[in-house]
Image (cartoon, rainbow, N blue to C red):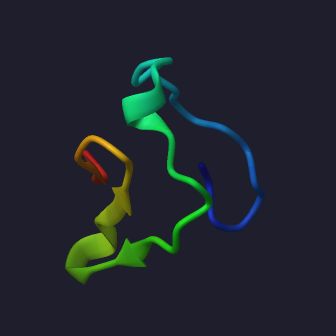
Amino acid sequence: MDAYTGEVLRQKKIGATIFRDTLQMASNIGDGGVYWQSTLGDVIRIAPR
């Protein structure tokens, strides 16, 4: 997603099971713009290319 325009630049399906449910938990944005999101089953890392 472009931070200035909100345009979706790329997207990828990460799963559709209960273990990918975030339960609306808070996420974190770390160094280099890496986005960390916890789910019921694991932690998802989304990073710029």
Seen in the picture, residue 6 relative to 36 is either above or below; the reply is: above
Vertical arrangement, residue 1 with respect to residue 28, above or below: above
Residue placed at 42% from the left, 19% from the top?
15
What residue do we see at 51% from left, 74% from top?
26
* Residue 43 x/y as whole percent: 25, 52
Q: Is residue 3 left or right of residue 48?
A: right
The x, y position of residue 44, in whole percent, is: 29, 48
The image quarter containing residue 9 is top right
Q: Nearer the viewer, residue 33 or 27?
A: 27
Q: What residue do we see at 62% from left, 60% from top?
A: 24
Query: What percent of the width, then of the height, locates residue 13?
Result: 47, 19
**The quarter of the displayed image where residue 32 is located:** bottom left
Task: Judge from the rendering whether residue 31 lies leftward or rightward of residue 40; answer left or right.
Answer: left
Query: Residue 47 placed where, x, y %?
Result: 28, 53
Image quadrant holding the C terminus, namely top left
Q: Is residue 24 left or right of residue 10?
A: right
Give the total number of marks visible in the rendering.
0
Compared with 35, 43 (above or below) is above
Q: Is residue 1 left or right of residue 47?
A: right
Query: Which residue sits at x=29%, y=65%?
Result: 34
Query: In this view of the protein, which residue sits in the foreground, 5 or 43?
Result: 43
